[in-house]
Amino acid sequence: MFTASLFIPAAIAATVAYLIGSISAAIIICRLMGLPDPRESGSGNPGATNVLRVGGKSAAGLTLLGDALKGLLPVAVTGLIIPHPPTIALVAMAAFLGHLYPVFFDFRGGKGVATALGAVFGMSLQVGLLAVVTWLAICLAFRMSSLAALLTCLLLPLYFMTGGHTAFALTYIVIAAFLFYTHRTNIKRILAGTEPKLGKS
């Protein structure tokens, strides 16, 4: 999978991706806009959904974009420089883990959906678009963003396998496990029927 000549470049790429992933868009944007620290306000999660609660749509949109770019850019650039699927998959995982456990912010990160989706687009535009369509369809059917994200992530390995991207599929099996862990409180609310629906307070 990793030859001797690829080991060091892959390790460097993964390290850079982790550091990029560790840049918390939510915290930085809230500080720049004079908003409360998202780790200390609302749900306490430094992600776009909580920034929407504490700062409104503009701040949330910028946070969502920043989190997605943290996954997209390292993966896309790695694909151009090192067109080796296992290395690209490793970089995607590193960026995702950087978002979850950011070294610059006391390892207190977000839930990882936007960064995971951004990395998908860096791997395959077709799978990325399919993921967005899947998310939208589930949202329209159930009106729950968290449920849409979890079900979409479960389908991503299948989408990648259909396209012959085995390394990417295996990576997203692991990412899905992390996402179910970061969304454990959402899952409890979904099962209890108390998860907030889109458009409702």
Image (spheres, rainbow, N blue to C red):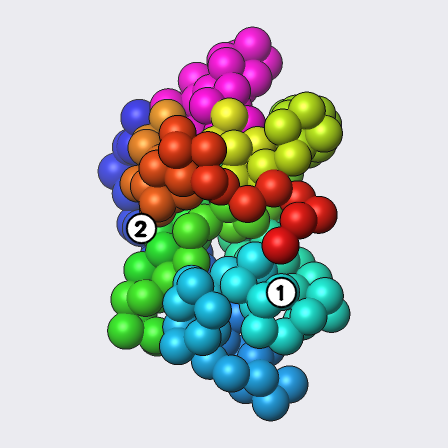
Residue located beneath label 1 in the image: 52
Residue 163 in view here: yes
Under circle 1, the secondary element is helix
Callout 2 environment at 10 Å: few (<14), some (14 to 19), or many (20+)? some
Disc on res. 11: 2
Q: Main secondary structure of the magenta part?
A: helix
Residue range in magenta is: 152-172
Foreground mark, 1 or 2? 1
Quarter of image, res 7: top left
Residue 41 among magenta residues? no
Q: Please give the name of the residue rendered at 26% of the width and 38% of the height, measured from the top-left corner.
A: 4
N-term mark: 1 or 2? 2
User: For this view, does 156 lie left or right of residue 99?
Assistant: right
- Residue 54, position in %: x, y? 57, 73
The CA distance from mark 1 to mark 2 is 35 Å
Residue type, numbered disc 1: Leu
Residue 26 spot, x, y in % from top left: 53, 70
Looking at the image, which residue is at 66% across and 59% down? 65
